[in-house]
Image (cartoon, grey):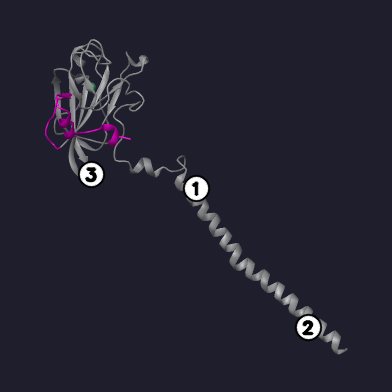
């Protein structure tokens, strides 16, 4: 074999070896990296995909006290200043800054039992008839490790099978709404007045005369989401 042919064979061998080595390096490193980044991408998709993310619901401390909690706040919101003249409810007998939110019912719920639910694990601290509300139940729980009370107004007291001191679980039905224009609502339309007061004292006022007094309440829409 001539020297030239030997050199050509050596060069071809080196080229083949280099090609094999390059392919090996590509499959060992780069294809793995591609797989890893694809997995990461899928994981990221899971995190931002609300349909597959069940954690956010499970981690939320509170549930809504009634169905359509957000969409049916169509009359009185938190902090709204109500007078006989400007009120969305006519005739109006109340005056002042609204300490809670009013959740209206759908028209087909007039003659149906509309359940109200405990928004978190809490204790019944008040139960009774209160002028302006009819039936009232107050639960005490915690917000950010501080005591807070949850007031449910215009409920049907005869639907409540709880007593003061009872523990209730998050999501447990505690009552149904009172019937419209009856003693159960103290003559009001059928709706839920829901308020969250800071601290553990029993606070029944649905309206306050000074805006600064609202500081003692939470805006329920900032707590219940
Ligand atoms: Zn109200």
**Picture quadrant where residue 211 is located:** top left
Q: Is residue 224 magenta?
A: yes
Label 1 within 8 A of ligand 1 by Cβ: no
Q: Earlier in the sequence, mark 3 or mark 1?
A: 1
Element class at badge 1:
helix
Task: Identify residue for label 1.
Answer: 45
User: Is residue 6 rendered to the left or right of residue 107?
Assistant: right
Q: CA distance from mark 2 to mark 3?
A: 76 Å
Task: Give the x, y percent position of residue 102.
Answer: 27, 23
Task: Identify residue for label 2.
Answer: 10
Would residue 173 be visible to someone looking at this image? yes
Q: Give the residue drawn at x 72%, y 77%.
A: 17
- Please determine whether, in this image, residue 195 is positioned above or below residue 178: below
Question: Around disc 1, counting alpha carbons within 10 Å, would you say few (fewer than 14), some (14 to 19), or many (20 or more)?
Answer: few
Q: Give the residue drawn at x 37%, y 40%.
A: 57
User: Is residue 102 rendered to the left or right of residue 205?
Assistant: right
Asked whether 216 or 167 is in front, the reply is: 216
Q: Quadrant of the C terminus?
A: top left
**Picture quadrant where residue 10 is located:** bottom right
Task: Give the x, y percent position of residue 156.
Answer: 22, 19
Element class at badge 3:
loop
Residue 144 marker = 3
Q: CA distance from mark 3 to mark 1?
A: 30 Å
Asked whether 24 or 215 is in front, the reply is: 215
Q: Which residues are magenta?
A: 199-225
Would residue 176 be visible to someone looking at this image? no
User: Is residue 148 rendered to the left or right of residue 40?
Assistant: left
């Amino acid at each position: 074999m001539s020297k030239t042919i030997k050199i050509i064979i050596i060069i071809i061998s080196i080229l083949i070896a280099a090609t094999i080595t390059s392919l090996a390096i590509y499959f060992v490193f780069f294809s793995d990296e591609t797989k890893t980044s694809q997995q990461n991408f899928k994981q990221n998709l899971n995190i931002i995909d609300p349909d597959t993310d069940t954690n956010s619901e499970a981690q939320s401390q509170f549930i809504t006290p009634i169905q359509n909690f957000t969409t049916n706040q169509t009359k009185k919101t938190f902090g709204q200043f109500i007078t006989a003249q400007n009120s969305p409810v006519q005739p109006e007998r109340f005056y002042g800054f609204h300490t809670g939110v009013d959740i209206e019912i759908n028209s087909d719920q007039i003659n149906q039992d509309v359940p109200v639910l405990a928004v978190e694990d809490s204790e019944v601290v008040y139960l009774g008839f209160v002028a302006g509300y009819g039936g009232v139940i107050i639960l005490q729980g915690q917000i950010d490790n501080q005591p807070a009370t949850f007031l449910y107004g215009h409920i049907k007291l005869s639907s409540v099978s709880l007593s003061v001191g009872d523990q209730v679980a998050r999501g447990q039905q505690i009552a149904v709404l009172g019937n419209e224009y009856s003693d159960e609502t103290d003559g009001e339309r059928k709706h839920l007045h829901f308020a969250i007061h800071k601290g553990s004292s029993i606070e029944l006022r649905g309206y306050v005369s000074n805006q600064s007094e609202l500081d003692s309440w939470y805006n329920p829409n900032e707590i219940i989401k």
